[in-house]
């Protein structure tokens, strides 16, 4: 507990959602089609004994490790945001790991087609806000004796980079499984306990006003003590508003009202090749990925007889601003760059150079600082006003789609002695954003998970084929020296 104005005691800040965390709840409240969970399908080889783990095995494994993730046994104090206070994380006295971990099986033959169809349905369903906001499925019936763990976690609980840390925590670095806790081991409450009563602090309205006032006062003091930083942030915000608000993202057929059901598909590429391409052209792996995605989007627009806009489609590309000491911290620590994708460019290498030039200019500018400033300013508003600001931060006038690239584990991982083969990621879809792209690297490869609204994107295969062709077109000109380089271990 902390002291508030007039002697009121306020719940510890870490128990209350931040404004950015709450944004993802508000986006779902705005539109029935929005799904604000992140997730993945982790595919494993058969264990050494040839037997996939049972559901009870998985539940006991997770229960024994959740002691290090106490928020996963907490629920929201309120199912909805709004009013004058943010929801808090409170202990769920009825928490049962069995309610969050279940079993499913693919229909025969269990090939990729069945897996992707199952994943599309799994990611279509929202999480229950009356319970801790995560779910995991032991998926059996994959061809070749493989099995999978599919998971989804609400974005208000964790961001993409933080979720990679959680994967590290729940899996093993060694093929010999870690010693598990006793059957039915309990999950302790969060450090410091949880505030479940209302007698120790003021009514919600006074509490919300007090917090909004404290946020504004602290921001004002910080501005007075750091005038240069305040000036730079103001310039950054002005630049962002002029570039991304007044010059809005183009209208496109990928920005239409969406429903709640999803399609899901995957494109794969060799990470070493992408590093070689980036090095050859003076760009990053992320630049190469963005160029390939641009190729796919161009193919999609042309197949729809839609002229690719000369100004390009605009992608929101999240940036991690998490400190190294925070890698296992939950909640959201992200900002964004808004990258123009040159879908009007027919040549693969010219597309890549335009992407590199644009991202280089963005990184040298204060664009990310401007986006962070918008989020900070929105956080100072009380929740009843913040909901409208949150929606504006994810409006189609700002960006056409999200493309997020999360560096995956750099070492082999295991579960129940079985090697992790690959991770297929999913990104949330906000209202009127029919397509989202998530990329995760692991084991020398990248997996591009493409999520789409089922009703408006019957042609998802065209997009994925275009992305695959975009990678191939960039890699086909690699010289022999680059081929040797990609065969050797490469630093990320």
Image (cartoon, helix red, strand yellow):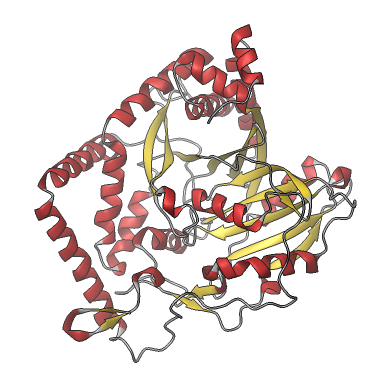
Examine the image and state in which quarter residue 180 appears: bottom right
Relative to 162, is 203 above or below?
below
Q: Nearer the viewer, residue 164 or 121?
A: 164
Point out residue 3 in the picture as x, y percentages from the top left corner: 24, 79
Depicted 150 relative to depicted 361: above or below: below
At a point 60% along the width and 76% down the height, the residue shown is 187
Does residue 313 appear in the picture of this structure? yes
**Extreme residue in the bottom direction:** 199
Residue 184 is left or right of residue 79, and the answer is right
Relative depth, front residue between 113 and 331: 331
Where 60 sits versus 280, above or below? below
Camera-nearest residue between 481 and 362? 481
Q: Report the residue at 43% width, 48% height from top.
A: 324
Report x, y in % for residue 4: 22, 79
- Residue at 56 percent of width and 18 percent of height: 276
Q: In the shown orientation, is residue 79 left or right of residue 367?
A: right
Quadrant location of residue 364? top left
Q: Where is residue 389 drawn, in percent x and y?
A: 30, 56
Q: Relative to 9, is 122 on the left or the right?
A: right
Most foreground residue, 180 or 106: 180
What is the tally of numbered marks visible in this picture?
0
Across and down, in percent, residue 361 comes to 31, 25
Can residue 346 be seen?
no
Q: Residue furthest top?
A: 480
């Amino acid at each position: 507990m902390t002291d508030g104005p007039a002697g009121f005691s306020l719940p510890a800040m870490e128990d209350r959602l931040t404004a950015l965390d709450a944004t993802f709840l508000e986006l779902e409240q705005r539109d029935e089609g929005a799904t604000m969970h992140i997730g993945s399908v982790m595919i494993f080889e058969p264990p050494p004994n040839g037997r996939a783990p049972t559901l009870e095995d998985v539940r006991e494994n997770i229960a024994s490790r959740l002691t290090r993730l106490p928020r996963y046994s907490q629920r929201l104090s309120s199912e909805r945001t709004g009013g004058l206070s943010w929801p808090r994380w409170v202990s769920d006295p009825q928490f049962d790991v069995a309610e969050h971990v279940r079993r499913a099986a693919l229909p025969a033959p269990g090939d990729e087609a069945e897996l992707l169809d199952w994943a599309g349905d799994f990611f279509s369903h929202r999480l229950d806000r009356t319970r801790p906001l995560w779910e995991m499925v032991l998926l059996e019936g994959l061809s070749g004796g493989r099995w999978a763990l599919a998971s989804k976690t609400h974005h208000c609980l964790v961001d993409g980079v933080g979720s990679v840390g959680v994967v590290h925590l729940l899996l093993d670095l060694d093929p010999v499984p870690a010693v598990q806790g006793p059957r039915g081991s309990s999950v302790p409450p969060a450090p410091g306990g949880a505030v479940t009563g209302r007698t120790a602090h003021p009514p919600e309205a006074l509490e919300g006003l007090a917090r909004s006032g404290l946020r504004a006062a602290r921001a004002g003091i910080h501005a007075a003590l750091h005038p240069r930083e305040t000036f730079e942030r103001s310039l950054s915000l002005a630049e962002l508003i002029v570039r991304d608000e007044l010059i809005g993202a183009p209208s496109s057929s990928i920005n239409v009202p969406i429903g709640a059901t999803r399609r899901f598909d995957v494109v794969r590429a060799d990470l070493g090749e992408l590093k070689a391409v980036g090095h050859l052209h003076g760009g990053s792996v992320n630049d190469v990925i963005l160029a390939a995605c641009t190729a796919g989007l161009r193919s999609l627009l042309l197949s729809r007889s839609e002229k690719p806009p000369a100004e390009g489609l605009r992608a929101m590309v999240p940036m991690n601003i998490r400190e190294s000491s925070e890698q296992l911290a939950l909640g959201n620590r992200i900002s964004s760059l808004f990258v123009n994708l040159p879908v009007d460019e027919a040549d693969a290498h010219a597309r890549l150079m335009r992407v590199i030039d644009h991202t280089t200019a963005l990184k040298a500018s204060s664009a990310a600082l401007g986006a962070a400033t918008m989020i900070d300013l929105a956080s100072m508003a009380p929740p009843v006003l913040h909901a409208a600001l949150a929606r504006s931060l994810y409006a189609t006038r700002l960006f056409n789609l999200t493309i997020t690239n999360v560096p995956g584990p750099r070492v082999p991982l295991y579960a129940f002695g079985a090697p992790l083969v690959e991770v297929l990621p999913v990104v949330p879809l906000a209202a009127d954003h029919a397509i989202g792209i998530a990329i995760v690297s692991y084991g020398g490869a990248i997996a591009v998970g493409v999520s789409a609204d089922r009703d408006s994107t019957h042609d998802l295969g065209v997009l994925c084929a275009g992305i695959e062709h975009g990678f191939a077109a960039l890699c086909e000109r690699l010289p022999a020296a680059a081929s040797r380089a990609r065969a050797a271990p490469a630093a990320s």
